[in-house]
């Protein structure tokens, strides 16, 4: 075989011919390049196949057609090869179909019949180069990654780590390699947790999760870890690769964001959004255990007053303290949430009997009624609580909340510092109220209001020189509606201001008429609601100029206020009252005896009349407690230069007893009900 080959070789006529044959047939890619012209003088079959051009095309082809690089880039590579003492160049060649390959070109100059050509052997190293690049990249990633990496053997012994591992854990490579990966274990995780992880890695080769680890300095950190296994061909473990990052900070900020979204910053209690979640959970749990949930809606009484008089900072402290107190009245598993302002909710789950609720509610009322120490001030408040049950009163969280709110309103209406259970009739009341609010808005425009007048009789002479203006609402459908029903609504919605203006004008016009026709010093009293004096306030200018335009003195009207208003220390109310006084308008204190009945306030505000509440008058009998009280009030008032009006006088006996006690005036059904102006005139 070899013999035959050698014989064949010897048949070549010349060395040159031998070269040409070798060149053409050789399986390596070979080119003969003419450096003078930059063209391919000859390409072998392997080259034709590789580049994808036929023999004829390649012969004489400009080298630039297969080179993707600029002349200077080629020069650079040549210089680099020289510097590295390489006998080859690395170029990027383009094939006929456009693909680009990385080639290693070994060139040497040869003399062919006096022509100097570059004999180049081309190796396609694309795949090898790619693999090298990938490896370099992998190593770069390993080195530069911010993610810690460790490679451990089947027994957990550390084989290698990357710099990020050192950054995060504090262990250098020399300290870590050879140690067991357990050096990172923290006792914030249970041994059971590690056992589970090992089990899963052994069984599935993988594990992923978050767990606490310990740095070299003993500090714990939370890491997100993933473990993967590389197996040998025989299925045995070659190594395991652990990748982790420190997510302690991220967890902290996540938690902070979560807290801010779900908890009230002032009190630390769950906020409205969290409350809804918790109520939903409590309901689910109750369904499973076939139990009830009680929802309490709690509103602090007089909180606004504290906030207004002592300032927001003190108000905040009160809320914090109140939150703590409420929290202490319920179990750990119950939820106390702050919905905003001075509104709190309590979810009592896991209820076996309703007595435990009353116990909790009474505890809450009691603890909130105890004094609050705010700086140097001692403050008393109370709470009104509404209670509703799941599933008895409602099944939706929104419905339950609305129920509890309504029940709370009922507790407030019943006099505060108490609780009230939700009942179906409350819903009716609430709906009724909503309708009234709507109707009230149009009532003034539709001229549905009337002013009635009730005579105030002089007990000495029996004559009528005074009257009280009392509003009536003639509702188109419901008929006459009592002011006690709609005045509070007008107050809450602010409509009272407009209504009050209207009443005042009516009364002023009426008193003008009666002054000219009946008695020159006739006087009409007008009820003024606290809301009118607070907030925007009564428009004095308009009231006084109204009187002026009617040529009436201030003395022709009396404003009736309640004691609560005198307690309001805000400058507004005091100013308002003094402005009236300056213009001769007199002031009467209504419903006297039902509130604080403080003498010092009577003097301070220079009250002209007090009106003894009808609840005292109703039970007057010689020698009765109420008789004693009435006597005392009258004596005291006279000492202070104040005149007394007795309200609700219904019987002749009451009139006589009051007259005997020197009461100045009386008002009541005995003389007349409140009546329209025309009817009133018949009383003269
Ligand atoms: P008030 O100011 O204490 O008015 C006296 C109430 O006692 C009136 O009730 C009157 O009708 C009633 N009354 C008079 N005589 C007797 C009697 O002999 N026996 C009994 N049992 N009651 C008698 P009314 O008109 O239903 O008004 C209720 C409350 O509504 C008033 O109490 C007042 O607080 C408020 N109000 C009435 N009109 C106005 C108004 O124009 N503006 C404001 N802000 N409030 C008003
Ligand atoms: Ca009155
Ligand atoms: Ca009254």
Image (spheres, grey):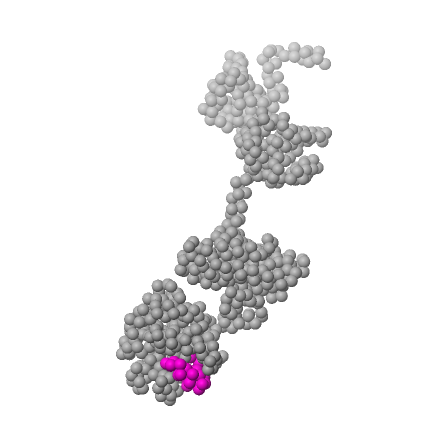
Of residue 457 and residue 190, the one placed in the foreground of this image is: 457
**Residue segment shown in magenta:** 647-675
Tell me if residue 596 can be seen. Answer: yes
Query: How far across and how far down the image is residue 218, in percent?
Result: 57, 33
Q: Quadrant of residue 128?
A: top right
Q: Quadrant of the C terminus?
A: bottom left
- What residue appears at the point 53 percent right and 43 percent down from the top-left corner? 252
Say if the magenta span includes residue 649: yes
Q: Quadrant of residue 442?
A: bottom left
Query: How far across and how far down the image is residue 444, in percent?
Result: 41, 75
Of residue 199 and residue 117, the one placed in the foreground of this image is: 199
Q: Vertical placement of 141 versus 255: above or below?
A: above
Q: Vertical placement of 57 versus 108: above or below?
A: below
Say if the magenta span includes residue 437: no
Q: Vertical placement of 510 versus 248: above or below?
A: below
Query: How far across and how far down the image is residue 86, in percent?
Result: 53, 17
- What residue appears at the point 54 percent right and 40 percent down from the top-left corner? 248
- What residue appears at the point 56 percent right and 27 percent down from the top-left corner? 172
Q: Is residue 549 left or right of residue 95?
A: left
Q: Is residue 627 left or right of residue 20?
A: left
Query: How far across and how far down the image is residue 221, in percent?
Result: 56, 37
Q: Quadrant of the N terminus?
A: top right
Of residue 90 and residue 591, the one placed in the foreground of this image is: 591
- What residue appears at the point 51 percent right and 51 percent down from the top-left corner? 268
Tell me if residue 225 can be seen. Answer: no
Q: Vertical placement of 225 versus 668: above or below?
A: above
Principal secondary structure, stretch drawn in magenta: loop
């Amino acid at each position: 075989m070899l013999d035959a080959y050698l014989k064949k070789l010897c048949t070549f006529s010349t060395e040159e011919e031998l070269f040409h044959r070798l060149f053409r047939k050789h399986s390596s890619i070979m080119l003969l390049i003419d450096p003078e012209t930059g063209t391919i003088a000859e390409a072998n079959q392997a080259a034709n196949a590789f580049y994808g051009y036929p023999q004829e095309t390649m012969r004489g082809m400009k080298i630039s057609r297969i080179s993707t690089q600029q002349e200077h880039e080629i020069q650079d590579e040549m210089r680099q090869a020289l510097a590295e003492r390489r006998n080859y160049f690395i170029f990027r060649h383009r094939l006929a179909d456009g693909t680009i390959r990385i080639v290693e070109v070994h060139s040497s100059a040869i003399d062919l019949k006096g022509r100097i050509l570059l004999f180049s052997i081309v190796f396609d190293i694309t795949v090898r180069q790619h693999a090298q690049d990938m490896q370099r990249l992998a190593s770069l990633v390993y080195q530069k990654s911010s993610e810690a990496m460790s490679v451990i053997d089947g027994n957990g012994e550390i084989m290698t780590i990357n710099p990020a591992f050192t950054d995060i854990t504090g262990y250098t490579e020399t300290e870590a390699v050879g140690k067991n990966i357990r050096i990172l274990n923290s006792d914030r995780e249970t041994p059971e947790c590690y056992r589970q992880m090992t089990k899963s890695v052994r069984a599935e080769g993988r594990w992923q999760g978050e767990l606490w680890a310990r740095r070299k300095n003993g500090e714990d950190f939370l890491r997100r870890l993933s473990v993967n296994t590389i197996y040998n061909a025989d299925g045995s473990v070659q190594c395991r690769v652990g990748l982790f990052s420190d997510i302690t900070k991220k967890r902290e900020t996540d938690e902070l964001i979560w807290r801010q979204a779900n908890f009230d910053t002032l009190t630390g209690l769950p906020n409205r959004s969290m409350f809804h979640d918790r109520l939903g959970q409590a309901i689910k749990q109750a369904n499973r255990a076939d139990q009830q949930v009680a929802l309490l809606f709690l509103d602090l009484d007089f909180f606004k007053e504290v906030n207004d008089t002592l300032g927001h900072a003190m108000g905040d402290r009160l809320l914090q303290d109140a939150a703590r107190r409420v929290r202490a009245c319920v179990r750990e598993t119950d939820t106390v949430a702050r919905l905003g302002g001075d509104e709190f909710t309590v979810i009592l789950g896991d209820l076996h009997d309703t007595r435990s609720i009353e116990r909790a509610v009474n505890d809450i009322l009691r603890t909130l009624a105890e004094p609050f120490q705010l700086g140097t001030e001692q403050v008393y408040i109370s709470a009104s609580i509404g209670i509703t049950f799941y599933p008895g009163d409602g099944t939706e969280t929104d419905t339950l909340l609305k129920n509890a709110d309504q029940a709370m309103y009922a507790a407030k209406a019943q006099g505060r510092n108490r609780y009230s259970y939700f009942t179906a009739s409350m819903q009716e009341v609430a709906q009724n109220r909503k309708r009234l609010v709507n109707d009230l808005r149009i009532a003034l425009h539709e001229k549905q209001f009337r002013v009635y007048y009730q005579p105030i009789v002089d007990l000495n002479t029996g004559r009528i020189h005074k009257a009280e203006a009392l509003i009536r609402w003639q509702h188109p459908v419901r008929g006459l509606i009592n002011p006690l029903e709609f005045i509070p609504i007008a107050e809450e919605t602010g409509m009272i201001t407009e209504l009050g203006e209207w009443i005042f004008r009516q009364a002023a016009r009426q008193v003008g008429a009666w002054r000219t026709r009946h008695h020159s010093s006739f006087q009409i009293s007008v009820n003024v609601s606290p809301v009118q004096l607070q907030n925007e306030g009564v428009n004095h200018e308009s009231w006084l100029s109204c009187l002026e335009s009617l040529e009436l003195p201030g003395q022709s009207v009396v404003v009736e206020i309640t004691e609560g208003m005198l307690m309001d220390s805000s400058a507004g109310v005091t100013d308002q009252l003094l402005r009236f006084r300056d213009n001769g308008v007199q002031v009467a204190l209504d419903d006297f005896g039902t509130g604080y009945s403080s003498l010092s306030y009577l003097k301070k505000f220079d009250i002209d009349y007090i009106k003894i509440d009808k609840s005292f008058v109703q039970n007057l009998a010689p020698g009765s407690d109420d008789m004693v009280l009435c006597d005392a009030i009258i004596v005291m008032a006279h000492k202070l230069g104040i005149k007394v009006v007795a309200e609700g006088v219904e019987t002749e006996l009451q009139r006589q007893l009051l007259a005997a006690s020197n009461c100045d005036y009386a008002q009541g059904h005995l003389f007349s009900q409140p009546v329209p102006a025309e009817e009133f005139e018949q009383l003269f």
